[in-house]
Amino acid sequence: MKFVDEATIEVIGGKGGNGASSFRREKFIPKGGPDGGDGGHGGNVLAIADRNINTLIDYRYARKHMARNGEHGRGSDQYGAGASDIVLRMPVGTIIFDAETNEELFDLTQNKQTVVLAAGGAAGLGNIHFKSSVNRAPRQFTPGKEGEQRKLRLELRVLADVGLLGMPNAGKSTLISRISNARPKIADYPFTTLHPNLGVVRTSESRSFVVADIPGLIEGASEGAGLGHLFLRHLNRTRILLHLVDMSSLDPDEDTIARAVKEMKALEGELKKYDEDLFNKPRWLILNKLDMVTDPAATEKAFLKASRWKGPVYSISALAGDGTQKLIWDLQDALDAAREIEQREQDMAAGVFVEEDRRFDVTRGSTES
């Protein structure tokens, strides 16, 4: 299935049914009074997050979604039937914007999360609601309200803990296939990866994390060169970025080191141009394909000296699996620590803080063991 991560749609809620103006007329009851029923509520257009969907391709071609109108009220106290809702299933990670104001309306981050995209119109009232002691034969009724109408822009950002980035053919697809259940296309030419791939890395029965692989970046990506700029948004939700560098063609005694460092700095520059927050995410350097280097230790030392890299460094061979196990465990530990900090911040925001395995609610002053 083709991967589509952007779409524009129009959603229209159903119109509410009109109320009825009617009077009861039966044999021997010439003045039975008002009996006009209410109309039915117009249908809503809903969006529900579905973890079994991973693309917005359904909305690339089906762009207009209209809910049904509610039925009109009738005499004999008959109320019109409400219209059924339309449910649009979208991938988890979809962000919904107002296409005209670019305002973010909803962020579908949880499976089965449901939001109302366009509310149906309210039902009109029949004349039975207007009778009173001074108005025995009301002819008033109200029409149904129009449903909401919106033009929306859908943007999919995959939910992943770790993002892989690097130049084309840096070995990102090989790495994700080695450490996770993902099976992307792997070939010896640039831009083999044409769309993001997700893989689940399971370190134990209860511990795991998700890795995202996007197409390789080249210099000028922020201005539209190559393919990677189209998918950089998918790294916005990640906690850690792994910057892969292909070491296979480097030699510590030649200027290949300088070219590799230049490419690395250029990619960092593209990240900064695209999004400052993305550039500031924790980034680990992964020196890949060291099994193809004559003197791995000397090459690694020369590259690190030339690049002046200060962050975490891992030397691996994604193809052979060398060094990947330590990388996996260190990533898991770092992500667990980040999740714990995030949970503590949420607890503090909610008025709860944790100390020595006891949970205190500062809003009530009570404790729970």
Image (cartoon, grey):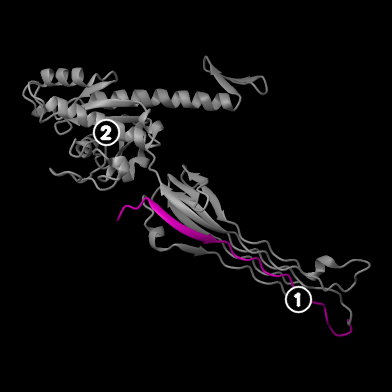
Q: Which residue is mark 1?
A: 75
Q: Which residue is mark 2?
A: 267
Mark 2 vs mark 1, foreground winner is 2
Q: Does 24 appear in magenta?
A: yes
At which x and y percent is residue 332? 34, 26
Which residue is farthest top?
356
Image vertical order of residue 172 relative to residue 359, above or below:
below
Which residue is farthest bottom?
27
Image vertical order of residue 363 relative to residue 195, above or below:
above
At which x and y percent is residue 161? 36, 33
Three-letter code, disc 2:
Leu
Q: Does 179 appear in magenta?
A: no
Residue drawn at (90%, 70%) of the image:
135
Check disc 2: other Cα within 10 Å, few if <14, some if 14-19, many if 20+. Answer: many
Check disc 1: other Cα within 10 Å, few if <14, some if 14-19, many if 20+. Answer: many
Residue drawn at (81%, 65%) of the image:
129
Q: Disc 2 on helix, strand or loop? A: helix
At which x and y percent is residue 270? 30, 35
| Disc on the earlier residue, 2 or 1 | 1
Evaluate whether residue 257 shows in this view.
yes
